[in-house]
Image (tube, grey):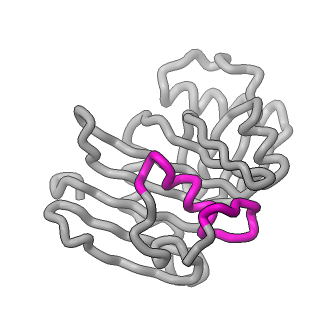
Amino acid sequence: MADWNRCDGRDERVAAAVTDVGFVGLARNEADYFPGRLASRGSGQAGLTLFSVAVDDPTVSTVPPEAERLLEREPLMAHLGTCVEGRPHVAPVWYRYADGVVEIVTTGRKLANIRQNPRVSLSIQKDMAGQARWMVSLLGTATVIDDEDETAAARRRINEKYGAGPDAYAENTLVRVEVGSATYRTYDDEIE
């Protein structure tokens, strides 16, 4: 069983816990988050589908096409989980997903935490009137891009997605997250 009290970047199961606390629900079992395993399971609940994909198998796409479609579809808030010195931090962020990479532009504690520990988690959920329709949880490694031109281009892409002006949030820095594993669930048969 995972030690959910430790969060130091050495244990992928702990990075998953950052996403789970308060946003997705605690993992029902560790198989959802262990690297090197591929699982496709139903939960037994009508209309609920759960899929987990880990990257250790080179024949498996890191993010399944169905999850990619959900991530790219509309401007939803993501929750970014970081962890430094055993203290998890979760905060909402705008994002853009393409080809196994998540781009965010951020500042403050999120950026400082990523500079110290690049292992992060992201949780994105679509709901209607408080009822979850789908969720995608990503674990990955973040890289801070300290290049003004790349940051400006990414900021324009993200701001366009969310309807903000191209130069809004100019103080933020680009972070790219290489997705290491993805878990997604749909709660409505019409989504799949």
**Vertical placement of residue 68 versus 49, above or below:** above
Nearest the viewer among 177 and 43 is: 43
Whether the magenta-drawn stretch holds residue 19 is answered as yes
Q: Residue at x 66, y 43 (%)?
A: 89
Describe residue 41's horizontal placement relative to residue 189 as left or right: right
Describe residue 75's horizontal placement relative to residue 149 as left or right: left
User: Which corner quadrant holds the C terminus?
Assistant: bottom left
Question: Which x, y percent locates residue 84?
Answer: 77, 51
Q: Residue at x 53, y 58 (%)?
A: 138
Q: Residue at x 44, y 60 (%)?
A: 26
**Vertical placement of residue 80 versus 12, above or below:** above
Question: Which x, y percent locates residue 137?
Answer: 48, 56
Whether the magenta-drawn stretch holds residue 15 is answered as yes
Residues rendered magenta in the picture: 4-25
Q: Residue at x 41, y 55 (%)?
A: 25
Q: Exactly how many numbered labels are in the figure?
A: 0
Describe residue 179's horizontal placement relative to residue 23 as left or right: right
**Vertical placement of residue 180 versus 152, above or below:** below
Question: Which x, y percent locates residue 99?
Answer: 55, 57
Question: Which x, y percent locates residue 190?
Answer: 16, 53
User: Which corner quadrant holds the N terminus?
Assistant: bottom right
